[in-house]
Amino acid sequence: MKLLRILSIGLFALVFLLVLAFYYRTPLFLLAASLQGAPEFIEKSDIELGENEAWVDDYFTVEQIDSQTYAISEARYALDTYFYLLIGTERALLIDSGSPHRDLTPIVRSLTNIPVTVIATHLHFDHVGNHNRFDGVLMPDIVDFRARAAQNKFSPTRHEYMGFIEGFERPQWDVVQWWTPGEMLDLGGRKVKFIHTPGHTPDSIFVWDEESKRAYMGDHGGDGKIYAFLPNSSLNDYLESTARIVETLPSESLFYAGHGGEHTRGTPVTDMQKLIELRDGFSDLRDDKLTSDGFWPRSYPISEDTMILTDWRGPGGKSWDFP
Ligand SMILES: [Zn+2]
């Protein structure tokens, strides 16, 4: 009798723990990731640069895209982050500022001496790491950002920033300018606008340079893993934003991503076909036409080199909000 009682209590406790683990799977996954701490930098000798990339110090690389546009990367960082410097005659715009591991200012200052405003494609720590080191932070006037910025001081939330994974404290910065959707930002001789593209996060944007037909899209797309399982990711939004980009931007557009794919080097740029593939991937995912591998997050290959990572389907799978 006593044994039966112990067994039933044990079983109850096990079921309780499994339910808890299920409910808190995303924080548990992030906690497990944070226990590993920041990754070691990759040895320079193990890195093969893209054809047009060059080392500018022992950490960063630069590739010139055109006479006034550069791609900069943290080649030795495991996340292989890329950010883009668009130089006008009056001001320069830095799209994403990398991880907080290294000071990016000497590299940017070696490329231009006009004022540099920085904007992030979204607030993850590997995109805002140097925000405080430039002449001002520009923020898109979307979601609830402006309402949250008392006296124009802004700080991302824990899950917007996610820097705890590598042991970084949440930063705070002064917003010097709010950028309205649809508004052209004049850099002097070149104008850009942004397009709100929620999916990877609710605040994700593309910066669009109409004249050169280039879009800077952060983590929205590209080769490798598409992160659609994070605390604020939304599959609905991902599909809607990608379909809108495919429908509204010219077919010859080029899309610059925030990370290189695994085992590839060189600036991560893709064409419209890749965005169409992504839209179709999300649409097939919604219609249950894809098969996944991996336990959690689920990994759904949509081409030879690209897979969408998602939460589970069904009750509690919170990024599954399709009707
Ligand atoms: Zn991200």
Image: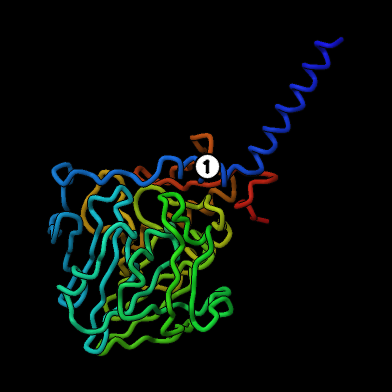
The residue tagged with tag 1: helix, strand or loop?
helix
Residue 122 spot, x, y in % from top left: 44, 66
Q: Choose top left, top right, bottom left or bottom right for residue 36.
A: top left
Residue 11 spot, x, y in % from top left: 75, 22
Q: Residue at x 28, y 81 (%)?
A: 211
Q: Residue at x 68, y 38 (%)?
A: 20
Q: Residue at x 64, y 55 (%)?
A: 322
- Mark count: 1
Q: How is the image coloured?
A: rainbow
Residue 77 spot, x, y in % from top left: 28, 50
User: Where does the C terminus fall, quadrant-wise?
Assistant: bottom right
Relative to 10, 67 lies left or right: left
User: Where does the N terminus fall, quadrant-wise?
Assistant: top right
Residue 176 spot, x, y in % from top left: 41, 84
Relative to 202, 58 lies left or right: left
User: Vertical placement of 142 versus 169: above or below?
Assistant: below
Q: Choose top left, top right, bottom left or bottom right for residue 62.
A: bottom left
> Tag 1: residue type?
Phe
Which residue is tagged 1?
29
Q: Is mark 1 within 8 Å of ligand 1?
A: no
Q: Residue at x 26, y 43 (%)?
A: 263
User: Vertical placement of 21 versus 92: above or below?
Assistant: above
- Residues 72 and 149: in front is 149
Ligand 1, by image quadrant, is bottom left
Residue at the extreme right of the image, as rendered: 1
User: Vertical placement of 55 versus 20: above or below?
Assistant: below
Local crowd at mark 1 within 10 Å, few (<14), some, or many (≥20)? some
